[in-house]
Image: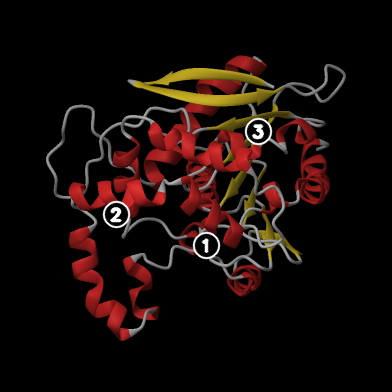
């Protein structure tokens, strides 16, 4: 496993690479793994080696996460500040395309047909990147969603919320713009004891909820700028929803879902499967939660390898 860094404009981006065996598939085939909120490339630590049996595998830290740069946030209506960025799914999707063009293509010596894997918000990022690749006539081979974020707090879903939540939304949106409040909230949520409590919800079987995982998630929160990327993310009240992207895609999409996910109900994934033609398969993993790739990696890797091998063999 090789760790590298890449300059995306003024921003340092961190990533992992595991090369396929030298007697494996020819160049031009690569897998790119995209983490969820609060996680990093290291969240795929139990997967990348196994998945590299049939293709070069990369795991990237999105801008604002992991060991990547964490520039100041610029929200809608705010004047640009020095080095500030508008965090969101368009920014992160553009990051994936640039990484494919500048890093993966460099490593492989030719353009690569990507297979994109995304967990939680990383699933929405992967779908948006697939949309951009499709628009420029270099489509991804497939997108694999792992408990993709459903983003129920987005304004486009406000009508689904109780009337009390609808009435309180303007106040919530005003409050989370305030840096003093975000700083206090971030400090609370980044405590190891709180992180461990959240992980016990996300990993209902308890698999791999240990000190290593807690430190993996807590360590980036100590970086300068971590509060700013958190501020940018919690203010994404009007950004892409997965169904908006799924209805535009012709790229094959497959989904793996823990049926005990406390935040992203599997019933919604089943509805997507019935609604969108691009979705070819949905595999439900009994008893697993929001991050099945880390909770039960052996089971996850076995299921995923079948899908990856099906694509890399063509």
Q: Residue at x 67, y 41 (%)?
A: 141
Residue 19 has which mark?
A: none
Label 2 and label 3: CA atoms lie apart by: 33 Å
Report the coloring of the rendering: secondary structure
Image side of residue 138 versus residue 314, left or right: left
Label 2 and label 1: CA atoms lie apart by: 25 Å
Task: Return the x and y of residue 146 as percentages of the image width and height.
Answer: 63, 54
CB-based contact (under 8 Å), mark 1 and mark 3: no
Q: Residue at x 47, y 53 (%)?
A: 194
Question: Which residue is denoted by mark 1 in the rendering?
Answer: 247
Task: Return the x and y of residue 235 as percentages of the image width and height.
Answer: 29, 54
Image side of residue 262 versus residue 297, left or right: left
Against 92, residue 201 (above or below) is below
For the N terminus, the image quarter is: top right
Local SS, label 3: strand
- Quick one: 139 or 173, which is closer to the camera? 173
Residue 113 has which mark?
A: 3
Going by the picture, which residue comes out furthest to the front? 193
Which numbered disc, 1 or 3, marks the residue that appears first in the sequence?
3
Against 263, residue 22 (above or below) is above
* Quadrant hosting residue 254: bottom right
- Quick one: 89 or 138, which is closer to the camera? 89
Label 1 and label 3: CA atoms lie apart by: 21 Å
Question: Which residue is denoted by mark 2 in the rendering?
Answer: 235
């Amino acid at each position: 496993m090789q760790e590298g860094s890449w300059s995306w404009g003024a921003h340092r981006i961190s990533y992992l690479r595991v090369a396929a065996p030298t007697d494996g598939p020819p160049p031009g085939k690569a897998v790119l793994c995209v983490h969820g909120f609060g996680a990093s490339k290291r969240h795929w630590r139990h997967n990348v080696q196994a998945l590299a049996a049939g293709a070069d595998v990369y795991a990237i830290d999105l801008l604002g996460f992991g060991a990547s740069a964490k520039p100041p946030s610029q929200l809608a209506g705010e004047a640009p500040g020095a080095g500030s960025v508008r965090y969101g799914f368009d920014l992160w999707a553009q990051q994936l395309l640039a990484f494919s063009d500048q890093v993966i293509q460099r490593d492989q010596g030719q353009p690569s047909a990507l297979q994109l894997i995304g967990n939680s918000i990383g699933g929405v990022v992967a779908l948006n990147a697939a949309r951009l690749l499709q628009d420029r006539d270099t489509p991804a081979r497939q997108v694999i969603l792992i408990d993709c974020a459903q983003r129920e707090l987005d304004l486009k879903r406000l009508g689904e919320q109780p009337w009390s939540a609808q009435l309180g939304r303007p106040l919530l949106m005003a409050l989370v713009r305030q840096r003093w409040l975000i700083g206090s909230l971030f400090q609370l949520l980044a405590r190891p004891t709180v992180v461990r409590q959240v992980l016990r919800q996300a990993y209902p079987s308890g698999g791999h909820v240990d000190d290593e995982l807690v430190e993996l998630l807590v360590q980036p929160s100590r970086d300068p700028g971590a509060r700013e990327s958190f501020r940018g993310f919690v203010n994404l009240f009007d950004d892409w929803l997965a169904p908006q992207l799924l209805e535009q895609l012709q790229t094959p999409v497959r989904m793996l879902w823990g049926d005990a996910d406390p935040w992203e109900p599997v019933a919604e994934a089943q509805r997507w499967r019935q609604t969108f033609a691009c979705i070819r398969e949905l595999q439900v993993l009994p008893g697993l939660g929001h991050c099945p790739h880390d909770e039960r990696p052996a089971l996850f890797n076995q299921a995923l390898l079948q899908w990856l091998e099906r694509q890399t063999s063509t």
